[in-house]
Image (cartoon, rainbow, N blue to C red):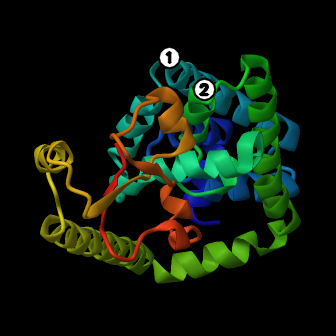
Amino acid sequence: MSDTLAFVLRYGYVVLYACVMAEQIGLPIPAVPVLLGVGALAGGGSMSLPVALGVVLAASLPPDVVWYELGRRRGSRVLGRICAISLEPDWCVHRTEATFMRLGRKLLLVAKFLPGLSALSAPVAGAAGVPRWQFVLLDISGALLWSGTWLGIGYLFSGALDLVAGWVARLGGWALVLAGAAMAAFIAYKYAERQRIFRELRMARITPEELKDRLDAGDETFTIIDTRTALDVKEVPYMVRGALWIEADEVERRRAELPRDREIVLYCT
């Protein structure tokens, strides 16, 4: 058995609790590999699935409730703080709010399966006004569904545990090198893409002061589009004079409503 599996076997539920808690807080520490390992060890009789499910609930519910309460009190500003550590902070808040508006409360059942949404679904539910008892019930159900799925997969494929561990052991330090290189390449790609978008936006940018001057002058050569989500509009129910509200995800579908003979000015905050 590899040193990693031996470590998980020795400390078991403590490792599971720490990894699940870290992921729910928003740290980039995946809990799925540990869930798979614990499930596999349970399949071999070394650990207990019911106890593991209880540990997951104990680790995930408290931070989710804290995020929910912060979202309930401070709205999308909390999402902005969490998204600040994202590789794509500019789209993080919008994507989360748009996903919640599309799926509604059902998002809480599947959020933990969706990368990047685990820590964000709780505050957006609070900001959207989901009743506290409904949130707790759905969050518990989602945590059990998520952890039960991965624990169950690990349990079913427990026979392959030693085989996987053997491959990792043969790769030795190269396994970490390859994983690190893949992560570094992904981060570099995202950073380069982000800088490219920033360069394009700088070339096509209009300042709030310039926009106001054109509005005050009665300039009718442009159309303003408010691309905020419904949650943002609910929180701050004001928009630029004469603006047309079309959420960013709806722009392509509703492009027939956009005039072809005018400039288009978009804003999202």
Which residue corresponds to the image point at 17% horizontal and 61% vertical from the top-left? 205
Q: Is residue 58 left or right of residue 87?
A: right
Which residue corresponds to the image point at 33% horizontal and 40% vertical from the top-left? 240
Quarter of the picture containing the C terminus is top left
The image position of residue 99, as x and y in percent, is 62, 52
The image position of residue 172, as x and y in percent, is 45, 77
Report which residue position mark 1 lands on: 73
Residues 253 and 176: in front is 253
Q: Is residue 150 above or below residue 172?
A: above
Residues 119 and 6: in front is 119
Which residue corresponds to the image point at 34% horizontal and 47% vertical from the top-left? 85
Q: Is residue 142 above or below residue 195?
A: above
* In contact (CB < 8 Å): disc 1 and disc 2: yes
Residues 179 and 136: in front is 136
Badge 2 amino acid: Gly
Q: Who comes first in sequence, dot 1 or dot 2? A: 1
Q: Is residue 154 visible?
A: yes
Tell me the SS state at disc 1.
helix
The image position of residue 155, as x and y in percent, is 85, 59
Q: Is residue 25 visible?
A: no
Count the marks: how many?
2
Quarter of the picture containing the N terminus is bottom right
Label 1: few (<14), some or many (≥20) within 10 Å?
A: some
The quadrant where residue 64 appears: top right
Label 2: few (<14), some or many (≥20) within 10 Å?
A: many
Report which residue position mark 2 lands on: 126
Circle number at residue 215: none
Which residue corresponds to the image point at 32% horizontal and 69% vertical from the top-left? 187
Badge 1 amino acid: Arg
The image position of residue 126, as x and y in percent, is 60, 26
Q: Is residue 212 left or right of residue 103?
A: left
